Amino acid sequence: MKSVLPALLLLLASPAALAADAEFAINIKDHRFEPAELRVPSGQKLKLIVNNQDATPEEFESHKLNREKVIPGKSKAVIFIGPLAPGQYPFVGEFNEKTARGTLIAE
């Protein structure tokens, strides 16, 4: 007789525990965000992977998203966001604000 424990655990797990956060990625290259504009779904949690391809660190900062994170050179960071209401959420690379600018657009 097969064990029913795995099936029972799946039934008991909440839908939120089974659902993975939507995953999006942006790069930092030459002190710029690529893409500079990223469209994401509104109303759900997001996993943003920031890949800093530059040799120097950069700080991802967004007052509207209430997020701030230093990403060392040649490394990646994960930033969890949301759920977001529809709208635009600007962000900057604080160490290179003149060039490192972007916007998350939740729709």
Image (cartoon, rainbow, N blue to C red):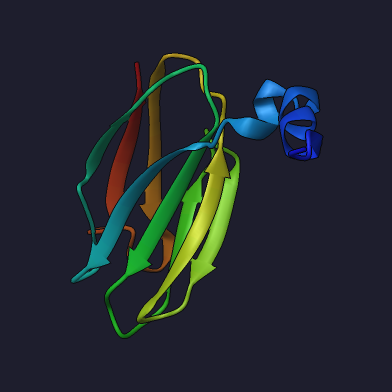
| 64 and 49: which is toward the camera | 49
| 82 and 1: which is toward the camera | 1
How many discs appear?
A: 0
Name the residue located 50 percent from the left edge and 15 percent from the top edge: 85
Compared with 12, 35 (above or below) is: below
| 84 and 96: which is toward the camera | 84
Q: Is residue 98 left or right of residue 21?
A: left
Residue 97, quarter of picture: bottom left
Q: Is residue 44 left or right of residue 35?
A: right
Residue 103, quarter of picture: top left
Name the residue located 39 percent from the left edge and 17 percent from the top edge: 87
Horizontal and vertical percent position of residue 3: 78, 40
| 31 and 16: which is toward the camera | 16
Compared with 63, 59 (above or below) is: below
Name the residue located 80 percent from the left edge and 25 percent from the top edge: 12
Horizontal and vertical percent position of residue 31: 24, 68
The residue most toward the front is: 1
In which quadrant will I find the N terminus?
A: top right
In which quadrant will I find the C terminus?
A: top left
Q: Is residue 44 left or right of residue 99?
A: right
Horizontal and vertical percent position of residue 18: 63, 32
Horizontal and vertical percent position of residue 74: 35, 81
